[in-house]
Every structure is written in C-alpha cells, then in structure tokens.
Image (cartoon, rainbow, N blue to C red):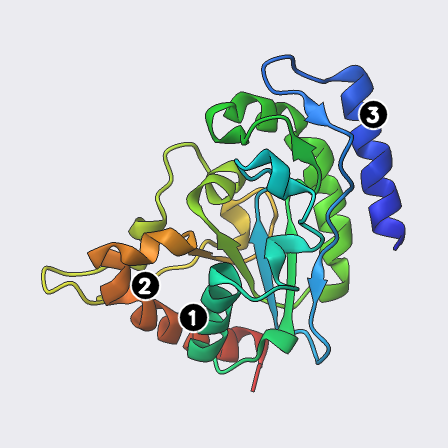
Amino acid sequence: MEIINQIIESRNFLKQNLDNTVNPIDETLPIIPPFRGKDEIKLIILGQDPTIRNIKSRQNITCTLNLDKNGSLRNYILSICAVLDLSIENVYATNLFKYFYTYPPANTIDVLNEHLSYNLELLKLELTEFDTIPIITLGEPVFKLLTQKNAKVREFWDFDNKSHMSNGHFISSTTNKLDRIIFPFPHQPSLRKTFYKATFNDYGYFMNNNIKKSHNIT
C-alpha cells in the first residue's frame, strides 16, 4: 500500500529530525495498517495510535484497533455498527498515528502535537478515497488533537436531567483540523459510565439520521 510507504518515510523523518526524548518514536515495530471491510465502505473510524501499555502485547497488533481479532474493542465497534444499521464489513478503521511510541502518549500530548501536522497531512491523503463517508473519532484524546485541548465528547452527546439525549451535535468541517464532519465517540471502557450507557443508542440514532440526510446513505 503506497500510503504505508509514505507513513514509513514520515516516521523515519520524524525519528531523525523531531524525535523527543520524553517519548521517543519506537521504530522497532512496524506501521499498523488500517482495517478495511470487504463490502462498500460507509463508515470511517479514527483512533489515535497503537501504543498500548503492555509492551509485550504490542508485537501482536497487526491491524488498527485489533479489528482482525475477536475482543472487547471489536465488539464495541460491532455495537456502533448495529445502531447505525451497518456491518463491520462497511468499516474503514485507521489511526491518526500509525506507528508506536515508547510510552502510551496520553501523558506526553506535546509530543503528539509536535508530530501532528505530518501525520494529519498523510491522513487527509489516505481518506481522499472516502471523501463523502462519515467519520467517527474513537476516544477523547484524538478528538482533542483535532479540535481543541478542552473539548469533551460528552458535550456533543448533550443530555437532559433525565439522562437521555436532548440534542446531539457533530463537529462541523470548519471547526476541526481534518476539515471533515466528525461524530465523536468515547473509548470502549467509558461505556461503563452511567452517562454513556444512557445516551449511546440515542447518539447513534442521531448520527444515523444525520448521515442518511447529509451523505445519502441507505
């Protein structure tokens, strides 16, 4: 895949010229390729990076979001697909950063910001094939990188005092660095929280209605 070769070149450039000793790029592990369903792509899911905390398990990651394996994350994506009347075979999943860092970069966000522009341009190029397909960001960190530091997913999942959806929102293409409409979703563990349990289906239905209108998806 040509885009993977470009990402390798970009990672090597960053490693040689802009690597940060606080959290160096780990070039001993491969670039993680996207997941692409076998049917017509109708949904893009965007994660942040593959650097999980368990160092030994990193070598077992061969696909974005581990969607080539059964597990809790794949099950979460299946639940998102279900509420959107889609199959996982309609999904294209990729990361903003497709290479590993030495440590999970949640606590070294400045390092990601230093490398963001290079990875963002490659992501835009990668997604040109799907220029009309709706995008979900998975987790608050990647959502914040694309919008603003104090952005919260729950603010877009608006709910009233009875803990159900009152007025959902998406991120317009003019208010994020990807220049695309984005629907923010939380990480899978957040579904244990009362707020997301109560509003998951409601936000899914809100998104479903909006993408059918704006993207002519059936």
Q: Which of 106 and 156 is in front in this view?
A: 106
Distance of label 1 from label 2 (alpha carbons): 8 Å
In the figure, 99 relative to 187: above or below? above
The quadrant where residue 97 appears:
top right
In the visual, does 45 lie left or right of 92?
left
The answer to whether mark 1 and mark 3 are in CB contact below 8 A is no
Question: Residue lying farthest left?
Answer: 161
Dot 1 or dot 2: first in sequence order is 2
The amino acid type found where label 2 is placed reads: Gly
| Res 167 visible | no
- Alpha carbon separation for disc pair 1 and 3: 38 Å
Could you tell me residue 116's position as x and y percent? Answer: 64, 32
Point out which mark residue 13 bears. Answer: 3
Q: Is residue 208 left or right of residue 58?
A: left
Instruction: Look at 49% across and 53% down and name the residue there.
Output: 138
Mark 3 secondary-structure assignment: helix
Work out which residue is located at the far front of the displayed protein and give it: 56
Q: Which of marks 1 and 3 is in front?
A: 3
Q: Nearer the viewer, residue 197 or 149?
A: 197
Q: Do the residues labelled 1 and 2 touch (CB within 8 Å)?
A: yes
Tell me where residue 128 appears, x and y as whole percent.
Answer: 75, 58
Is the residue 126 above or below the residue 80 in the image?
Answer: above
Whichever of labels 2 and 3 marks the residue nearer the N terminus, that label is: 3
For label 2, the residue is 168
State which quarter of the image contains the N terminus.
bottom right
The amino acid on which the numbered mark 3 sits, given as a three-letter code, is Phe
User: Given the image, on which type of amino acid does mark 1 rest?
Assistant: Met
Residue 207, disc: 1
Q: Residues within 10 Å of mark 1 (few under 14, many from 20)?
A: many
